[in-house]
Amino acid sequence: MPDNNFGYANARMRARRSRLYRPDDFMAMRGLQSLDELFHLMRRGLYGPDLDEALAVYSEAEAVGVAVQRYFARETRTVAGFFNDRFQPLIRLVVRRLTLDTIKVALRAQVLGTAGGQTLHLMMPTVDLSLAELRELIRADGPKAMIDLLATWRFPFAASLLVAWAEGGGTGAGEQILPHLEFALDAGHYADALPTAEDFKKVGKALVTTLRREIDVLNILTGMRLANEVASDDDLVLWMIPGGRLNPARLANTFHGHGPDVWRDVLKGTPYGPPMTKGFLAYDQTRRLSSVGREMERFLLDQAMQEYIRDSLGIGVAIGYLAMLRSEVINLRVIANGIALGAGRRLMEEALLLAEERS
């Protein structure tokens, strides 16, 4: 049986989950006519104090992003604190995925020369990196200085980033350095996370399943993006991360030199077939692979929510709760930006990160 610590932690997260917005709430928010109406709703929920503090300093358009950032940072630390020392490695792996997303935002901003206040508001502090540390990353004098700063803080995978920086061509590579850096982060994370989660045996099973699923999705998206940009299957497989359920070599063969019709046909019998099919329906209209990526992200959210139910006595509750919290942060930003820019209901709905509601 799982340690009693999971009973305490999961009870606390289940109570907190009940306070999150539901998909129907976000669909209704598309009809709000002003930011004041959104502020009124947020003040009645979790974000009231943070929103009022943000409005005292920032513009209305920025305040929602700042408020959810502050709440998210505090909440990830609170959730990690529910677990005793024995299970800290597990919960930190769940949170680390969120941390890597934030570092990718910072790297992209540094490489593209867009680092600044707006970028900072898109970054999510977690138990790994505080808001003060994120400010330092954004203020660093370029991407190399940012990586050096991470190395100084002994952040995991900083050494891998330094190697990727050198092998990818450094400053001279321009935007082409980004895939090298992102791959280094992901490969380092999963190479460490999978054996750590497996060491916990049954208690870590839901996390192992989640990690393998994330690897498959990353490899599928990489395969689509690079299908016609590398010389051979062998070159493509070098960009894929081992450890997923799908064989990287077979994936490389599926994607290289082919197009959407082949990709859909080969993968239709896998768990990734339905979201790919739905994504490519949108792709047929937009001609952007990001349409497929968005559906795969919704698929991962849906699966995390299922882990919340399936692994009700283990780490699955944390996996699901933190995934739902992350989606809430994204959706509140989408709604706030949509209202501020006068975007229509359809455009906001396309950008929302929603999954089927589950009890």
Image (cartoon, grey):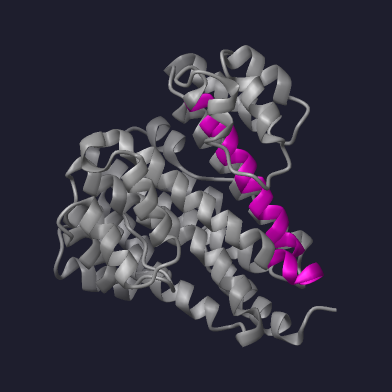
Quadrant hosting residue 337: top left
Image coords of residue 291 (percent x, y): 48, 28
Q: Is residue 276 magenta?
A: no
For residue 335, say whether it is visible.
no
Residue drawn at (36%, 42%) of the image:
167
Image coords of residue 314 (percent x, y): 74, 71
- Up/down of 244 relative to 346, above or below: below
Question: Quick one: quadrant of the C terminus?
Answer: bottom right
Q: Nearer the viewer, residue 124 or 48?
A: 124
Quadrant hosting residue 276: top right
Residue drawn at (59%, 43%) of the image:
241
Image coords of residue 271 (percent x, y): 73, 36
Residue drawn at (34%, 40%) of the image:
178
Q: Is residue 198 magenta?
A: yes
- Up/down of 289 relative to 74, above or below: above
Q: Nearer the viewer, residue 198 or 356?
A: 198
- Up/down of 249 relative to 333, above or below: above
Left/right of residue 99 with respect to residue 190 in the rendered view: left
Image coords of residue 244 (percent x, y): 68, 44
Task: Considering the whole magenta stretch, tell me its main secondary structure.
Answer: helix
Q: Nearer the viewer, residue 52 or 142?
A: 142
Q: How many marks?
A: 0
Q: Nearer the viewer, residue 190 or 237?
A: 237
For residue 188, say whether it is visible.
yes
Residue span colored magenta: 197-225
Left/right of residue 72 with respect to residue 18 in the rendered view: left
Question: Quick one: quadrant of the N terminus?
Answer: bottom right
